[in-house]
Image: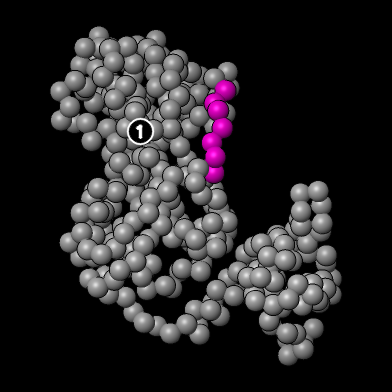
Amino acid sequence: MNLKNIDLNLLVYLDVLLHTRSVTQAAESMGISQPAMSNGLRRLRGLFADPLLIRTKDGMTPTERANELQPLVRRIVAAVEMAVEPDKGFDPASADRVFRLSISDYSECTLLPPLLRAMHAIAPNITLDILTPSDVSYKDVESGKVDLVINRFDDLPQSFHHQTIWRDNFSCMVSRNNPIRDHFNLSNYLDASHVWVSKTGMGIGVGVEPGTMQQLGWVDDALARLGHKRKIRVYTRHYQAAMQLAELDDLVITLPSKSAKLQRDNPDVIILPPPFEIPETELKMAWSSLLQHNPAHQWLRGLIAEVASELD
């Protein structure tokens, strides 16, 4: 196949079609007629010798070949868009814009306050729109509707760029009146009642099944490797709530140390090292290839990395 015989506009069509999974919506997005987009899809099917999108009861569903092509085509189109976009630079002191960030509760309580203090000093007119992980899908990030997602991830789409913000170990919090504080060993830890707190990844969460150990996270995985299981009485996705529950006399909360340190001046709780080894956790920021070379976005990522390094 000779490249000069290929209409490269078809890659733009394919990018939009795979994003919207609708000929009608793709045509509206491109500002062309539906018959023109249908003709583009027909030509794409001939070019790749594959149906690409198949109509099912759930709408237009991409084929296996289309799923393979999507991240590659997205990168190609993004690179072309960046090449023809004029470089206007970015001045944070005079900028007046909104950045939309999807941030986990853990990130929000540890990273957001120092980030806002830094931004207030050097970019006073910038606004942050903070979304929770359940507000956002991978498609929102991929399309650039959300600037950054900051969380702990088990995996990310290959088309995403990402950077580690910090690594964190774990601490335990108990009430100052909890008798376990004087004999905080593994045996007493296992006998105690616990609060589970976590929210990783993206999308709407599902309920936890207490009878299973799957997907409970770092703490319970570490215990399982030792052949143990803790008694969890409360499951929450909110670190602030978990830290407040530490004030109750009969609960143990195990959470990342940067969260626990927020309560170091609370006279009603004490912070203790876990009585067993837990592998450290990793906080990352991830973003779309569409925004990789955007000057404003580069500035934001650099500021977050700088603030995080100071906290680390």
Would you place residue 134 above or below residue 244 in this image?
below
Q: Amino acid at mark 1?
A: Tyr
Residue 116 is covered by the magenta coloring:
no
Is residue 62 found left or right of 307 in the rendered image?
right
Residue found at x 64% / y 75%: 30
Assign a secondary structure to mark 1.
helix
Identify the residue position indicated by label 1 in the image.
Answer: 239
Is residue 302 found left or right of 53 in the rendered image?
left
Tell which of 80 and 280 is nearer to you. Answer: 80
Main SS category, magenta section: loop
Residue 187 at x, y percent in the picture: 37, 12
Would you place residue 188 above or below residue 200 in this image?
above
Residue 174 at x, y percent in the picture: 27, 19
Please identify the residue farthest to the bottom as the structure is shown. 4
Q: Residues within 10 Å of mark 1 (few under 14, many from 20)?
A: many
Asked which quadrant contains residue 300, the reply is bottom left
Instruction: Report the colour scheme.
Output: one colour
Asked which quadrant contains residue 265, the reply is top left
Would you place residue 183 above or below residue 134 in this image?
above
The span shown in magenta is 203-209
Q: Quadrant of the N terminus?
A: bottom right
Residue found at x 47% / y 40%: 200
Residue found at x 29% / y 36%: 259
Would you place residue 117 above or below residue 262 in this image?
below
Residue 175 at x, y percent in the picture: 24, 17
